[in-house]
Amino acid sequence: MNARLSARALIALSIVYGLTIGVLDILHVAGTTMTTFTVVGAVVLGGLWVIRGLFIGRG
């Protein structure tokens, strides 16, 4: 996977994650479920961005 493709994939995942959080909020999902999903999702996405940054770098 090249640098541009990995960035696009992570951006797409971030957008999907954000939309999912929005839909869960609109549907008034229970607070505990929402909190767990947001924390786990943020940690996973953040970790993927860090790994991409460490292995691919800026240029």
Image: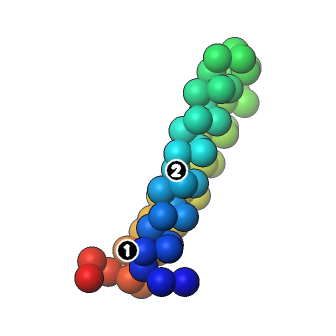
At horizontal 26% and vertical 82% (from top left) the residue drawn is: 59
Residue 13 appears at what percent x and percent y? 57, 54
Q: Which residue is mark 1?
A: 53
Category of crowding for the residue at label 1, using alpha-carbon neighbours closer than 10 angstroms: few (below 14), some (14–19), many (at least 20): few
Count of numbered circles in the view: 2
In this view, the residue in front, 31 or 1, is 1
- Indicate the secondary structure of the residue bearing disc 1: helix
**Residue 15 at x, y percent in the picture:** 53, 45
Residue drawn where x is 65% and y is 26% of the image: 23
Residue 2 image point, x, y percent: 48, 83
Look at the picture and state if 56 lies above or below 6: below
- Between marks 2 and 1 in the image, the one whose residue lies nearer the viewer: 2
Taking the image as shown, residue 4 lies to the left or right of residue 14, namely left
Residue 28 appears in the figure: yes
Q: Looking at the picture, does residue 48 appear above or below residue 3? A: above
Residue annotated with mark 2: 14
Say which amino acid is labelled 2.
Ser
CB-based contact (under 8 Å), mark 2 and mark 1? no
Q: Identify residue type, mark 1.
A: Gly
Quadrant housing the N terminus: bottom right
Q: Callout 2: helix, strand or loop?
A: helix
- Where residue 45 appears, x then y in whole percent? 53, 57
Q: Answer left or right for 4 relative to 24.
A: left
